[in-house]
Amino acid sequence: MKIRWRFCKACVVNDMRAICVFCGSSAGVDPAYTRAAWQLGGLLAQQDITLVYGGAQVGLMGSVADAVLAAGGRVAGVIPRLLMDKELGHHGLTELHVVQTMAERKEVMMALSDAFIAMPGGIGTLDELFEVWTSTQLGLQAKPCGLLNVQGYFDHLVSFLDHAVAQGFLREQHRRQLKLHDDPAALLLQLGKP
């Protein structure tokens, strides 16, 4: 599947129709991660915001999608054929885009979304987050990005980013573009949803 798109130059943050959530294909060791995924999913559905995510039925990815669906919301999954063929794809979504590569997955998720939230996850989650945040830094798009810092999961990453600012490798203005909160509702407010 090929989707043509371009980065937006201005994003009306109070009119978010779709938020992409990057998160783990594992649930992690702390049940608080899964609880936060369900809380965020419920809030998205309540606020009539479509969830865009990686299309899997496992881990935090499956939990946030199931939460949106259980609350009557819409979910758009984007999954590479390789992972779909391993039976990781969620078959109960509102829409499912099956793409060829991981790069195409990120491209489609970015095109479908008005904002981005990273929840706890591994290197794939960080890769996705840093790609969209870099696009914001470069002025290729103006879609807000945030970290849902469940149980302090991102504390060390935030410390590193502050260190990068102090050492002159990251500008403070770009550091401030990445929002941070431990509460899903508060993070949505920071991203611009009233």
Image (cartoon, rainbow, N blue to C red):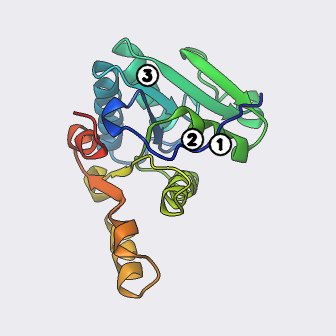
What is the C-alpha distance between the residues marked 2 and 1? 5 Å
The numbered mark, 1 or 3, whose residue comes first in the sequence reads: 3
Residue 106, position as x, y percentages in the image: 63, 44
Residue beneath disc 2: 110
In this view, the residue farthest toward the bottom is: 167
- Asked if labels 1 and 2 touch by Cβ distance under 8 angstroms, the answer is yes
In the rendered structure, the answer to whether residue 180 lies left or right of residue 82 reads left
- Identified by mark 2, the residue type is Met
- Asked if labels 3 and 1 touch by Cβ distance under 8 angstroms, the answer is no
- Could you say whether the residue bearing mark 2 is in a helix, strand or loop? helix
- Could you say whether the residue bearing mark 1 is in a helix, strand or loop? helix
Residue beneath disc 1: 107
What is the C-alpha distance between the residues marked 1 and 3? 23 Å
- Disc 1 or disc 3, which is closer to the eye? 1
Q: Quadrant of the C terminus?
A: top left
Residue beneath disc 3: 66
In this view, the residue farthest toward the front is: 9
